[in-house]
Amino acid sequence: MHICHLYPDILNLYGDRGNIFTMKRRLEARGIGVQMIGQPLDIDKYDLFFIGGRQDFEQEVLLRDLAGGKGRDIRTAVEDEKVFLAICGGYQMLGQTLDDP
């Protein structure tokens, strides 16, 4: 399994990096090989995308990066039904609105 950890150095609020390490260890314990792949973003190389959380300031900085083309690649991955695990602010950054009736 190839996992893309988006912005691992910036989006790590409350130890979000521990989530990805735990998932990796659990997959390996089940005999599933795991390879963590970094940048550049090439959606065809990944089976799962992980994005953690952070404070608003860091999210605003990253929104500029997403607007620079990476957001388009992520939308394509979603349309291709790739799997995403998004935590906290990472989840917020992937959306446009939140409806909570």
Image (tube, rainbow, N blue to C red):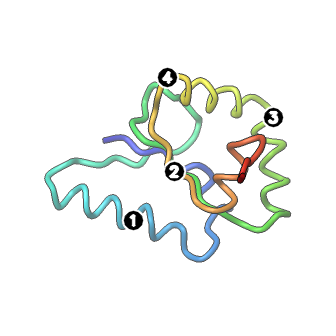
Query: What residue is disc 1 on?
Result: 21
Name the front one of labels 1 and 4.
4
Q: Which of the two discs, 2 and 1, sits closer to the camera? A: 2
The disc, 1 or 4, on the residue closer to the chain's N-terminal end is 1
The amino acid type found where label 4 is placed reads Asp
Distance (Cα) linking label 4 and label 2 = 16 Å
Q: Disc 2 versus disc 1: distance between alpha carbons?
A: 11 Å
Residues marked 4 and 3 touching at CB (< 8 Å): no
Mark 1 touches mark 4? (CB < 8 Å): no
Query: To which residue does mark 2 refer?
Result: 50
* Residue 63 drawn at (x, y percent): 80, 45
> Which residue appears farthest toward the bottom when viewing the image?
14
Mark 3 or mark 2, which is nearer the start of the sequence?
A: 2
Dot 2, crowdedness within 10 Å: few (<14), some or many (≥20)?
many
SS at circle 1 = helix
Inter-mark Cα distance, 4 to 3: 20 Å
Secondary structure under the numbered disc 4 in the rendered image: loop
Q: Amino acid at mark 3?
A: Ala
- Considering only vertical position in the picture, is 33 above or below 25? above
Q: Earlier in the sequence, mark 4 or mark 2?
A: 2
> What SS does tag 2 mark?
strand
The image quadrant of residue 12 is bottom right
Give the quarter of the figure containing the N terminus.
top left
Query: Disc 1, disc 3: CB below 8 Å?
Result: no
Q: Nearer the viewer, mark 4 or mark 2?
A: 4
Query: Of marks 2 and 1, which one's residue comes earlier in the chain?
Result: 1
- The residue that appears at 45% across and 39% down in the rendered structure is 83
Tell me the tag on residue 80: 4
Residue 74: x and y in percent read 62, 32
Q: Are marks 4 and 2 in contact (CB under 8 Å)?
A: no
Q: Is residue 66 left or right of residue 22?
A: right
